[in-house]
Image (tube, rainbow, N blue to C red):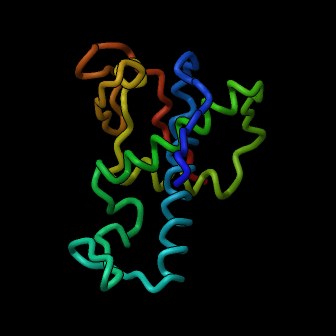
């Protein structure tokens, strides 16, 4: 029997700008949709409790309807991917406000989706932020998040 020893690249020294919260959320939502599409192709469907025999899972819902715990799985993957990109020397530059980007902003900012305080998160503390929040309720740090929605 082979023993697998995962060796992920250490990204603990990478700090991300809060400006990437929207990108993180877009990656997390898309990752969930890819996961759900794969499960649907395997015959999975919605069920109130996960059941591997009947191929049912409560996660077979739109990202916006997932519990915060389930969203955090996708968000964690997204944030670790973004940190890895920086660690490998890449920069993330937004070139333009596309129609897709404007739609994403509209969905994020009008949903019940929560963001997390980056200061608390860097210390392993999950502190939800609600839309239009200016200061973190836990650490008191001012948040530099542009909550304005630009709708044309």
Q: How many marks?
A: 0
Q: Residue at point 28% right, 14% down?
A: 139
Relative to 103, is 50 on the left or the right? left
**What is the quadrant of residue 132 in the picture?**
top left
Q: Residue at point 40% right, 67% down?
A: 62
Decide: is 85 above or below 122.
below
Q: Nearer the viewer, residue 94 or 132?
A: 94
Give the position of the C terminus as an image quadrant.
bottom right
**What is the quadrant of residue 84 in the picture?**
top right
Relative to 5, is 111 on the left or the right? left
Relative to 1, is 53 on the left or the right? left
Q: Residue at point 52% right, 20% down?
A: 12
Query: What x and y, as percent, mark residue 47?
Result: 26, 78
Decide: is 145 above or below 35.
above
Query: What x and y, as percent, mark residue 112?
Result: 31, 51
Q: Residue furthest front?
A: 1
Q: Nearer the viewer, residue 145 or 44?
A: 44
Q: Nearer the viewer, residue 10 or 37?
A: 10
**What is the quadrant of residue 14 in the picture?**
top right
Q: Nearer the viewer, residue 45 or 96?
A: 45
Decide: is 113 above or below 138.
below
Q: Residue at point 60% right, 52% down?
A: 102
Query: What x and y, as percent, mark residue 57?
Result: 31, 73
Decide: is 33 above or below 96.
below
């Amino acid at each position: 029997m082979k023993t697998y020893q995962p060796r992920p690249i250490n990204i603990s020294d990478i700090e991300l700008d809060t400006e990437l919260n929207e990108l993180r959320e877009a990656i997390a939502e898309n990752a969930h949709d890819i996961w759900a599409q794969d499960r649907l192709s395997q015959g999975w469907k919605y069920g109130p409790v996960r059941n591997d025999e009947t191929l049912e899972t409560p996660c077979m819902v739109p990202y916006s309807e997932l519990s915060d715990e389930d969203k955090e799985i996708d968000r964690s993957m997204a944030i670790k991917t973004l940190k890895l990109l920086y660690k490998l020397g890449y920069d993330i530059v937004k070139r333009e406000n596309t129609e897709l980007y404007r739609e994403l902003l509209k969905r994020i900012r009008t949903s019940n989706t929560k963001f997390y305080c980056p200061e608390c998160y860097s210390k392993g503390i999950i502190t939800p932020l609600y839309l239009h929040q200016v200061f973190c309720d836990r650490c008191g740090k001012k948040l530099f998040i542009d909550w304005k929605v630009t709708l044309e």
